[in-house]
Image (cartoon, grey):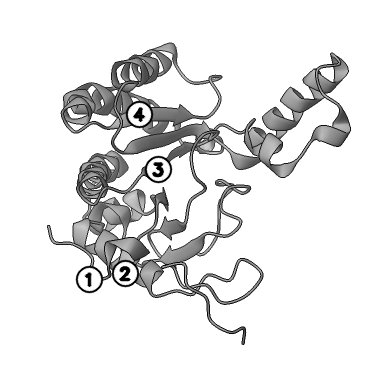
Amino acid sequence: MGRPQSPASSWPRHIAVIMDGNGRWAREQNLPRIAGHQRGAESVRKVVEQCRALEIEALTLFSFSSENWKRPRDEVDALMTLCCEHLVNERKMMLDNGIRLRWIGRNDPLPARVVDELRRTEDATAHCRGLDLVLAINYGARAEIVDAVRSLANDARAGRLSPEDISESLFASRLYTAGLPDPDLLIRTAGEQRLSNYLLWQISYAEIHVTDRFWPDFDEDALNQAIDDFAGRKRRFGGMDTPVDGSTDAPN
């Protein structure tokens, strides 16, 4: 399995992943698309277990976007079934390893069976204090921001909140990811270089690592490489150069 070569003090607290390339992987293997999703589920387990072993605080996986409903119906149905099976099969592993599951996204139009398994796993792992595993399912960042705005607007209309009191921190508290640190590192597989409506507020200052590997080929070594890439960056946050270890250099 191995570990990153960089010191642990330089690793990200929160890693977000856009898992891309399942279908292309399957096509290259002359397999049906669902075989790519099934193989991708194996990569999920590898990455989750590695993040737990490295004591990463949070891992957020873009599992199914609000735009993915446009895919063929048989593929969507297969993905929903795979999601339920994966939640059931991995629940014991999460409990054994102290992994807490959180789901972010909208209920509708997710099938009730999927929502039930997500809620059941959330409840079962609510006491866990290791890795926060966040699944973004039926998720879109614009929808999340709209929901946060509606929440604040409803409070203002009811007199519970003055518009002048709205701050960045208050807004962030109404997002689906409230209570989690913002991602430090965003990983995207399959070589694509776009954000795809993913965590648009939260990744404002995230470092982005793009790999040509398809998600089914992404493993512990690929994750270690991404972490080492992150550890070598200087994070400015709009100001002075700030290495990931928190020290500062003179500005360029």
Between label 3 and label 2, give the one nearer the viewer: 2
Residue found 29% across the figure and 39% down from its top? 34
**Amino acid under label 2?**
Asp
Q: Which mark is first along the chain, 1 or 3?
A: 1
Question: Compared to 237, does 62 lie above or below?
Answer: above
**Amino acid under label 1?**
Gln
Look at the numbered discs 2 and 1 and tell me whether their residues touch, using CB distance below 8 Å: yes
Quarter of the figure with residue 85: top left
**Amino acid under label 4?**
Leu
Q: Is residue 60 visible?
A: yes
Report the front residue among 79 and 223.
223
Residue found 53% across the figure and 20% down from its top? 107
Question: Compared to 10, does 215 lie above or below?
Answer: above
CA distance for labels 3 and 2 = 20 Å
User: What residue sits right under mark 4 in the picture?
Assistant: 101
Between label 3 and label 1, give the one nearer the viewer: 1
CA distance for labels 4 and 1 = 28 Å
CA distance for labels 2 and 1 = 7 Å
Q: Position of residue 125 (x, y in %)?
A: 30, 22
User: What kind of element bears circle 3?
Assistant: strand
Between label 3 and label 4, give the one nearer the viewer: 4
Q: Which mark is first along the chain, 1 or 2?
A: 1
CA distance for labels 3 and 1 = 24 Å
User: What residue sits right under mark 2 in the picture?
Assistant: 228
User: What residue sits right under mark 1 in the picture?
Assistant: 5
Q: Could you tell whether 23 is left or right of 252 in the image?
A: left
Report the front residue among 66 and 204.
204
User: What residue sits right under mark 3 in the picture?
Assistant: 61
Q: Position of residue 38 (x, y in %)?
A: 24, 39
Quarter of the figure with residue 168: top right
